Image (cartoon, grey):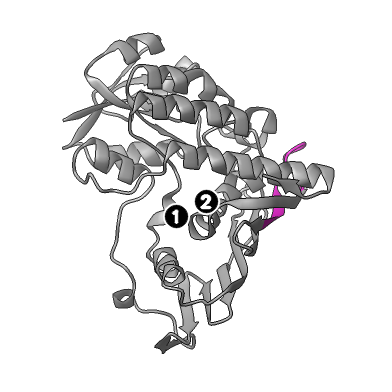
């Protein structure tokens, strides 16, 4: 039995994470729940059978029975708790983004890597079998020279008032470090970096959208120039009623599109793939865990090969996203 602690319960994904943990009650338990808001900690502890609220973060980190922690504090609180967790040699999952800024993300990544503990964050899209198929085809050279790439991740959060109540801090960039573009865009940024490697330059345009959340970007477009020469764009918003086209990648010898969650692929190197029909499940890679599930698989010993996102990877995503925001604010390309 693996013993965990919840450090912070502020993030909108907290209920989903609690559900994921309760599904695995045979292999792990949450002993403590801590939050700087004691009422919030108490409420979440009632959803985790056997857990207790602990007012002292130091006491949790001193308990040798706790081997791993899940951090769901507000983003600007990460820098206060993550270095302490690393110093205590606890494995740590930090909900994305790792840092409020590129610099504090880099500082936390250094502390985590120096401690030699397991780390991951919430980039669950890496487990998507359609995206894994696209990555395989890129690695085989089946696209030829990639000339254009585009990804989108949008929902109707602002339209539906998702951040009006308990999660209001997520629409306050002074606490979250970003708005809707950064919140959702970091997922597709992760995939683009996973597919195409380091970025040379970045820029973007952001907008308040519906203006439901004053002083907060609700929608935006980013542009990336990769060191490899690939040019890519990413869209992210809380203002969309639909997001039917998730991915487009064009190359001199192949093309892929994810439309309504179905993957279409064609390549001169794969004659059976002409792009006219979506790939069947049997043609895609098998399922793997990702995000929190991959982290839990590793810390419980269920799967020591479950893919994690490295701390330096997470920090680099912070740095690139920060460059997009700076480019949008200053109307210029920012060199990474």
| Magenta stretch contains residue 133 | no
Residues drawn in magenta: 207-224
Examine the residues drawn in magenta and state their main secondary structure: loop
Q: Which residue was labeled with disc 1?
A: 125
Q: Secondary structure at mark 2?
A: helix
State the mark number for residue 315. Answer: none
Q: Position of residue 89 (x, y in %)?
A: 32, 21
* CA neighbours of label 2 inside 10 A, class few (<14), some (14 to 19), many (20+): many
* Contact (Cβ within 8 Å) of mark 2 with mark 1: yes
Q: Is residue 22 visible?
A: no
* CA neighbours of label 1 inside 10 A, class few (<14), some (14 to 19), many (20+): some
| Magenta stretch contains residue 218 | yes
Which quadrant holds residue 161? top right
- The one nearer the camera, 34 or 132, is 132
Q: Which residue sits at x=67%, y=40%?
A: 322
State the mark number for residue 190. Answer: 2
Q: Position of residue 73 (x, y in %)?
A: 49, 27
Label whose residue precedes the other's in the sequence (2 or 1)? 1
Q: Which residue sits at x=52%, y=18%?
A: 80
């Amino acid at each position: 039995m693996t013993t965990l602690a919840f450090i912070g319960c502020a993030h909108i994904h907290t209920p989903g994470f609690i559900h994921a943990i309760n599904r695995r009650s045979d292999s792990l338990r949450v002993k403590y729940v801590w939050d700087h808001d004691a009422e919030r900690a108490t409420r979440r502890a009632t959803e985790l059978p056997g857990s207790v609220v602990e007012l002292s973060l130091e006491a949790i980190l001193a308990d040798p029975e706790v081997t791993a922690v899940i951090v769901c504090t507000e983003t600007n609180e990460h820098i206060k708790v993550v270095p302490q967790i690393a110093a205590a040699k606890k494995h740590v999952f930090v909900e994305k983004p790792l840092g409020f800024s590129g610099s504090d993300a880099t500082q936390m990544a250094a502390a985590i890597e120096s401690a030699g503990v397991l780390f991951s964050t919430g980039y669950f899209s890496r487990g998507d079998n359609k995206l894994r198929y696209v990555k395989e085809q890129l690695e085989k050279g089946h696209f030829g020279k990639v000339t254009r790439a585009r990804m989108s991740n949008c929902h109707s959060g602002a339209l539906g008032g998702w951040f009006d109540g308990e999660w209001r801090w997520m629409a306050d960039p002074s606490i979250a470090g970003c708005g809707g573009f950064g919140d959702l865009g970091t997922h597709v940024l992760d995939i683009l970096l996973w597919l195409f490697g380091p970025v040379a330059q970045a820029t973007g345009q952001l907008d308040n959208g519906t203006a439901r959340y004053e002083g907060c970007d609700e929608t935006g477009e980013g542009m990336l120039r990769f060191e490899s020469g690939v040019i890519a764009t990413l869209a992210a918003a809380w203002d969309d009623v639909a997001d039917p086209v998730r991915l487009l990648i064009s190359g001199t010898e192949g093309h892929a599109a994810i439309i309504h969650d179905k993957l279409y692929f064609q390549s001169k190197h794969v004659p059976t793939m002409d792009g006219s029909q979506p790939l069947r499940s049997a043609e895609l890679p098998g399922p793997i865990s990702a995000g929190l599930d991959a982290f839990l698989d590793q810390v419980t010993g269920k799967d020591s090969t479950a893919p994690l996102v490295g701390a330096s990877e997470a920090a680099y995503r912070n740095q690139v996203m920060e460059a997009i925001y700076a480019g949008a604010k200053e109307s210029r390309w920012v060199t990474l």
